[in-house]
Image (cartoon, rainbow, N blue to C red):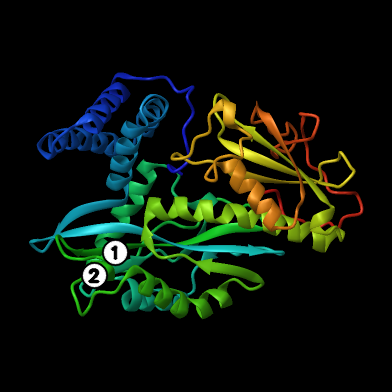
Amino acid sequence: MAVHRTKSSQRSSPEAEKLVSDAISLAASGSQVEDRFWEERLTVRLMRLLKSQNQNVIDAALDQTFRINTVAFEVLADTAETLAESLKIEHENQEWDVLLIAMPIVAHTRYQIPSGPLQTNMIEATAQALHSSIAATDARLAIVPWLYSIDQMPHSHCQTRILMEALASAAICAKEVKLELRDMSETIAVLADPRFIIAALSAPSGSPIFKWQEESPARQERGVSLIGWQTAMHEPVASMLPGCEFELLLPEAYFTNCRLADKHVRPLSIRAGVNFLESTLGILPAGLSCVVGAFGEEQADEYRISFSAKGSSEVMYGVIWPLYDRESVSSDALNDLSDDESPIKKICDALHDAGVEDVFRHAMLFDPELCDDCGAPLFPDRSGEAVHAEMPEDTPTQQPLFH
């Protein structure tokens, strides 16, 4: 997905350089008049790339601005996301605003988290809950009849724009959503993962799309909308996700909610892993030892957490804590706990909250290696080697893959 950071190995191009230049100019602007000038330039360039499906140029520009100017990166990332997840379209001499929204379900289990086609009653329940708790009075909607795993979501700005355009007319005209959903990728089985229902909300341009945009008495604050949404959707989701514990997040713009759900699931992945090891091997959390290391090519792209039995050097399980575009860690702060907002501090807090007391942190940056045979990620051991995580031979055979 486009919410994940790109790789600095990508070559720059004239088109990417122009994007970077416009983003830096917009970030440095000191007036709204100048803002509008650079915004128009940036929008035209990005729309040209989105229409031609030239995601590589967008990624290269994002990567370059991320490394040299974080304010310009935010400007470029926000503009690209806005153009991918929203549009204006004319229908019967009326201009409409359309926004792609994601409805995250953050779930964890000891078994398997379902994904796949949504039944008609689930689509109807979702539509009713959206109208009653989220969508503005005059808003119209179209729901994709699929429960997405993260592996099945659009993986770029260009792919997101294609989905947005496919849903726009269905939302405005209240038509059936027609998408080819048979060739979805396989869902990777993990213990904690978000699931998403995706929809398009539309409203006449200039009109509210969400209830919290409306005037009184129709106006409803976000917190009230969230409670109403969670109440209305709890029973339908519970029947759709048997054996799972879950939390429903507020339906919001696509990219914002993809990031929010991904971040929300990270501590749950640790807790689910600890629970899995306790239920499968009978090892209490206090009997576990964890090693945490940062992994990436030139910068930390993720942390990998190894689980071992206390007193053993054998890594038997692993969890990945990915970092996203708006998160960065300097090379001299990979294991610094002084910043409460740093990823390593959040990881250690999540481990301690799950009952793990023995946590070892590496200060080095590991290469993001995968197993040559099976493609599984390698995890750090205490000696500083990246190794394959292997459950004991007498472990029950039905296991989830690593998160």
Q: Secondary structure at mark 1?
A: strand
Outermost residue toward the front in this view: 338
Q: Residue at x 52, y 60 (%)?
A: 195
The quadrant where residue 67 appears: top left
Image-based side of 55 in relation to 375, left or right:
left
Q: Residue at x 33, y 79 (%)?
A: 132
Q: What amino acid does circle 1 point to?
A: Leu
- Above or below residue 402? Residue 47 is above
N-term-proximal mark, 1 vs 2:
2
Q: Which residue has dot 1 on it?
A: 201
Q: Which mark is residue 9?
A: none
- Above or below residue 367? Residue 391 is below
Q: Are marks 1 and 2 in contact (CB under 8 Å)?
A: yes
The quadrant where residue 141 appears: bottom left
- Above or below residue 399? Residue 384 is above
Q: Which residue has dot 2 on it?
A: 139
Please name whichever residue, 152 or 251, is drawn nearer the observer in this view of the structure: 251
* Residue 387 place in picture, x, y as percent: 78, 34
Please name whichever residue, 268 or 137, is drawn nearer the observer in this view of the structure: 268
* Residue 265 place in picture, x, y as percent: 57, 55
Classify mark 2: residues with Cα within 10 Å, few (<14), some (14-19) or many (20+). many
Calculate the distance from the C-alpha at mark 1 to the C-alpha at mark 2. Answer: 6 Å
Residue 343 appearing in the image: yes
Q: What amino acid does circle 2 point to?
A: Ala
Classify mark 1: residues with Cα within 10 Å, few (<14), some (14-19) or many (20+). many
* Residue 28 place in picture, x, y as percent: 23, 29
Q: Secondary structure at mark 2?
A: loop
* Residue 43 place in picture, x, y as percent: 21, 38
Image-based side of 138 in relation to 56, left or right:
left
Image-based side of 177 in relation to 90, left or right:
right
Q: Residue at x 38, y 20 (%)?
A: 12
Outermost residue toward the left in this view: 93
